[in-house]
Every structure is written in C-alpha cells, then in structure tokens.
Image (tube, rainbow, N blue to C red):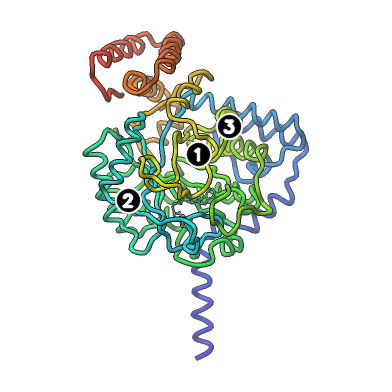
Amino acid sequence: MFHVKHAVNNFLTEVVNNMTDYISEEQIAMYLEHRKPDKKHYADVLSKAAEGKGLLIEETAVLLSPPDEETKHLLFNTAGKVKQQIYGTRIVLFAPLYLSNYCGNNCLYCGFRKDNKIIKRRKLNKEEALEEVKLLEKQGHKRLLLVTGEASGSGVEYLADLIGDIYALTDIRRVNINVAPLTVDEFRMVKEAGIGTYQLFQETYHQPSYKYYHPSGKKSDYQWRISAFDRAMEAGIDDIGMGVLFGLYNYKFEVLALCQHAEYLERKFGVGPHTVSVPRLKRAPGAEIQTTPWMVDDEELKIIVAVLRLALPYTGIILSTRESQQLRNELLGLGVSQISAGSSTSPGGYSSSGDNNVQFEVHDTRSLDEVVASLCKDGYIPSFCTACYRRHRTGEAFMSLAKVGDIKELCLPNALLTFKENLLDYASQETKKLGENLIGKELCLLKNEALVNELKSRFERMNRGERDLYF
Ligand code: SAM
Ligand code: SF4
C-alpha cells in the first residue's frame, strides 16, 4: 500500500514539475551567476539587440547587468532607438476601472487582502459600474481595464454581462480585464462578451517567494495561476498581457522567468504576450508588508524596461500611475508604449460617491487632459486607437504584421485619427492648441502624399461631426 501511495505521489510531483518545466530556476540562476559580462561581451549583445529582433534568454541575462554607467547609457540609447523604430512616438492611453475590492486571498502586499479590516468593502452593481464608465468616457477614454479582487463565486456572468453593456451603451471601444485566473469555460464567456486583452500578473515566478506572499486562498496555488494563459489560449483568447510585481523577489530572476514564460507560450500557441506590465510594489493601506529586501529602485526599473524592450521588441510595455510623472516620462523614452491616466484604484473612485478604499498608492494623479498635454509637449502622439482589435488583427495575425514592420503603416494614421477625435471632443483649449500643432508637424513628416491627403479628408469629415474613423 505504501509503495502504491509513494508511486502515485512521485507521479503527481512529476506532473506538477513538468507543468512548469519552462520556468527553470536552475538555468536562470546559472545565467545570472556565470554571465557577469565584460564591456566587450555586453557591447556584442547590445549590437544584436539593436537589430530589433529579440534576444535569447542568456543574452537577456547579459543585458540585465551593465558593467558600468557608460554601458548602462548605451543600453538606454539602444532601447530608445528600437522603441522609436517599432512604435514611433505613439503612446496608447487607458484607464483602470475597479469593480470590487472583495477578496478571498491574503496576498501580503495588497490592500484588498481578506484579512485587512481597515478598508470598506464594495462591489459595484451594474448601474454603479456603468456610471463610472460614463465618467471615464467623459474624460475621453476609449479603452478600459476592468479590475476585481478574487471573491468566491467570482461573478464571471456579472463581468460578461457588464462588458456587453459597456460596448452597447457607451462609447468605450475596447474592454480589457485583469481578474483572477478563470477556467476554460469562464474564459470562453468573457471572450464571447468581447474582451480585448486578458491581463494577469504572475507577481513572482520564484516559487518559494510565491508561497510566502500568498499564504492562503485560491491564489496560493502557483500552478493554477501560471497555467491561466494556457487556459485562456485554449478558450480562443490570443491577446494576453503578462506581468510581474517587481519588488517581491530579485528583479533579474523575474525578467528572465517572464521571458521564459513568453517563449513557452509562443512555442506552444504560436503567439507570445501582446503586452507586458511592469508594476512596482507600492505602499498599500492595511497590507501586511509595505516593503521587502527586493525593492526595485528607479535606475533598476529603467534597466528592466530597456531590457524588456530589447528582449521582446514587438510586445507593448504598460506602465501605470503607480509611478511618478517624472519617472513615467523617462520610461516612455526607454520602451514603455502604453500608460494609464487619471486612474483610481478604488471601486467607485471616479464618482462623487467614491470613497478612499484604494488598493495601493498612485503617484501620478494628473487628469487625462493633463497627461495628453504633457505627452504633446514631449512630442509623443497620444493614441486611443482600438482598430487592430476591431479589425481582428490580434494574436498571430498582429504579430506577423508587427514583425515585418507593416503594422506601423496602420498605427500612425489610426493614432492621429483618434487623437484628433480626442482633441475635438474632450480637450481643454491649451491641449487643443498643443495637439493641433503636433498633428500638423506629423503630417509634414509623412512621406506618403496619398496618405496625407486621405488623413486631411478624414479630419475634415471629423470636423463635420463624423466619428470613429479608422484603417
Ligand atoms: N485580484 C486579481 C489578481 O490578484 O490577479 C486581479 C486584480 S489585482 C487588483 C491587480 C494587481 O495589483 C495584482 O496582480 C498585483 O500585482 C497588483 N498589486 C497588488 N498590491 C499591490 C501593491 N501594494 N503595489 C503595487 N501593485 C499591487
Ligand atoms: Fe486579492 Fe488580487 Fe489583492 Fe491578492 S492582489 S489580495 S488576489 S485583489
């Protein structure tokens, strides 16, 4: 009897190990131990990275450890150039919408954790949620990210129903979600409701640390979380957003493990992540821990963004309002391509009835209009484009266009059209002036005369009241 039990246990352990054999802690440790690069080696890897075709994991490991300040600046320059080549000056904008702060988990770092008694719990009903959506719409947002805690009976029906109503009743054009891992059937439900990206952060890929930070609740199951994208892909969602909560463990380990995870998904499903997010641990009211020995400083975050830009050149990098205005501006130049703006991390936080039950502190509290104005001043084109998703250019279809550079031909005109719409409908006088100037300059830079004429004619149609024009 003992032998049978032992054999079954061994078998189960093997199954579990095999499920994540694409994250090899030993291999990562070896790369980080043995690849302390000299300047020559570093420069060689950097010149390969400059081609914008991505990197092997061992090359990514090299770039994470610039041997001196001068080399670090070369890394930043190279990442900036690759970003410019692939994304130009477009920056996509979105807002998170927190639906509920009920949670059955106890993530030590989070203000929504079950055992936190100092926040008031709230789940928005459909009407309240739609009221929040309308407020975001009034600011000019076209893309939303719905966020919830992980309560028992997670309410996938509620979510799917709400997504349907958002599309039907408001002018929001793309709804992404960041919710706890679902089953394949549940993923099918949200796919049918029309979600854009399914976003989920692994928090930490380091299993012992994962266990420590997630002591109880469904989320304590590392396997269930890391296999969420497999189930999402199985359900037909080919647009996924990965991420790590930086500050929980060694950031170099996390970047390499995330790249291994991305590589595994690309191998298995033919498509890697559409986006990667780079949240850093922030103070959270009532969280069990406010800081760790692994906190990532600003310079390290810059290295993370620059290296990810070079390792995964066709993957969007998302930065939230967890970071300050100044650091966000710097990170835009190193690889970030999407940012949230005018955000609240509390359910009901956009309406006057919103209280202050935040998940964590935000450090960029500017309104969307202020962010748009500041992007214009720095020469970035704010984009509210949702065309790829609506034209079904997602997953493999998107990647094949992106990798040959064709997507650029569509993105810039679409960005300009959505930006013009934003200026017409939502911008303050000052932002309008800055924006119209920027659009004028961009038209002068375009070499394709037919495209310039087409854009000008569409702008005219928009001046006469037409909306939602895209290629
Ligand atoms: N509850 C779901 C989950 O945990 O996946 C989805 C939403 S959760 C509200 C979104 C993300 O917030 C988490 O994945 C985590 O990375 C991040 N987060 C939690 N506490 C944080 C903190 N103190 N600072 C920064 N980000 C935090
Ligand atoms: Fe719940 Fe997500 Fe916060 Fe963990 S991070 S306590 S799962 S809301």
Which residue does the numbered mark 1 point to in the structure image?
A: 320
Q: Does dot 1 land on a helix, a strand or a loop?
A: loop
Whether residue 226 is visible to the viewer of this picture, yes or no, is no
Residue 204's x, y, as percent? 56, 54
For label 3, the crowd category at 10 Å Cα-Cα, with few meaning under 14, some 14 to 19 and many 20 or more, is many
Q: Does dot 2 land on a helix, a strand or a loop?
A: loop
Residue 44's x, y, as percent? 70, 33
For label 2, the crowd category at 10 Å Cα-Cα, with few meaning under 14, some 14 to 19 and many 20 or more, is some
Compute the Cα span from label 3 to label 1: 11 Å
Left or right, 11 with respect to 195, comes to right
Which residue does the numbered mark 2 point to in the structure image?
A: 124
Mark 1 Cβ inside 8 Å of ligand 1: no
Amino acid type, residue under disc 1 in the picture: Ser
Compute the Cα span from label 1 to label 2: 22 Å
Which residue does the numbered mark 3 point to in the structure image?
A: 331
Amino acid type, residue under disc 2 in the picture: Leu
Amino acid type, residue under disc 3 in the picture: Leu
For the point 46% across and 66% down, which residue is it?
217
In which quarter of the view is residue 102 placed? Answer: bottom left
Compute the Cα span from label 2 to label 3: 34 Å
Residue 244 lies, with reference to residue 416, above or below; the image says below
State yes or no: discs 1 and 2 in contact (Cβ < 8 Å).
no
Whether residue 11 is visible to the viewer of this picture, yes or no, is yes
